[in-house]
Amino acid sequence: MILMVSVQDLYEAKQALKGGADIVDVKNLQEALVGSAHPNVVKQIRDEVPSAHHASVTLGVVPDQIGTVSMAVYAAGTLDATSVKVGFMVSEYSVALETLLAAKEALAGTQTKLIGSLFADNLLYDGGIDPDLMVKLAKEGQCDGFLIDTLVKDGRNLFDFVPEERLKEMVLEGKELGMSTALSGHLKMSDLDELSRVNPDIVGVRGAVCQKGDRDSRVHWESVADFKKQLDLRQTGEINVYGGNGATENNGSDWIIIDGTGKTCAGIIAALSKQISEDTSSFVEVIIPDVLNTYDLIVWAEKNSHDIVTQRKDSEGSLRMLIKP
């Protein structure tokens, strides 16, 4: 999991990066429920963000105006945003789908990724698109990834609207499709264990890393650093968000090895799926540096009726999982 921090200006972007954020997500909290920042602000931040980090753009809740949205998406691509998020609250599914397809076309020739977004609390609004359709919409809309967020500002957060198990299913579905998966929505430090069990690629926050925990105040680098530290402790397994992993020793044999070093969970699953589709008789050992990805692979294996024969830690601290197709 990597950390995305929502920022409104260059000062906040610098604070987020100083604290260790992997992505700065530029938005405008003063515009309606959530809106997009002025292009000059985006350009200023994009020019300052080191190449090793990402600067994404949020369009917020977009209107049912396909041409207008496509133009905004085109602008994000022209500004070289890492990704652009297109969110839907109250809309017909068919209109949302057509909007995403037009947005994808508008990004042709750029490196900017298209991220579809629905809000976990959409059903509070008459005509709101069911967030349960997120994976379907992202897939049919040719998105590179998806974000599930919230709109309410009454103290409730993502997990109050979508249970952990359902989020886990949706994240795994997205990873199997090769999409990036992101979760946000008034998340706090106290939600980190649940988030880690769901294991999205990206965790998005703002209020949790602002002074006094108030999303309307300024992003503060020390708060970002604290959140990032706690996220990393769970990712490395130093804080165990499960009751144990049932690891066993393996005496060794001849089998196919897939090295997951440097790969996302989606990349590991894609490599496994490809290998097993081509060879159903060979055992496969996968090297998993990120312990949180272990649990996604267990769910993936069970879902596809593969047997996990052994799990063991190697001398580098990576987990090695032996799978029998």
Image (cartoon, grey):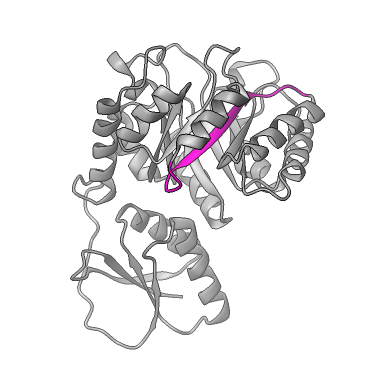
The residue sitting at 79% across, 34% down in the picture is 94
Q: In which quarter of the image is residue 82?
A: top right
Q: Is residue 98 magenta?
A: no
Question: Observer-nearest residue: 31 or 203?
Answer: 31
Horizontal relation, residue 115 to residue 216: left or right: right
Image point 51% across, 24% down: which residue? 150
Q: Which residue is drawn at 52% across and 29% down?
A: 44
Residue 163 image-quadrant placement: top left
- Residue 257 in the image: state x and y as whole percent: 38, 78
In front of the other: 82 or 295: 82
Q: Which residue is drawn at 42% across and 56% down?
A: 299
Residue 245 x, y percent position in the rendering: 25, 57
User: Which span of residues is magenta-colored?
Assistant: 50-64
Residue 166 is at least partly visible in this image: no
Frontmost residue, 79 versus 107: 79
Q: Position of residue 52 (x, y in %)?
A: 42, 48
Check residue 56 for magenta coloring.
yes
- Above or below residue 95? Residue 108 is below
Q: Residue 77's spot in the image, x, y percent?
A: 66, 40
Q: Is residue 179 left or right of residue 77?
A: left
Q: Can residue 82 be seen in this view?
A: yes
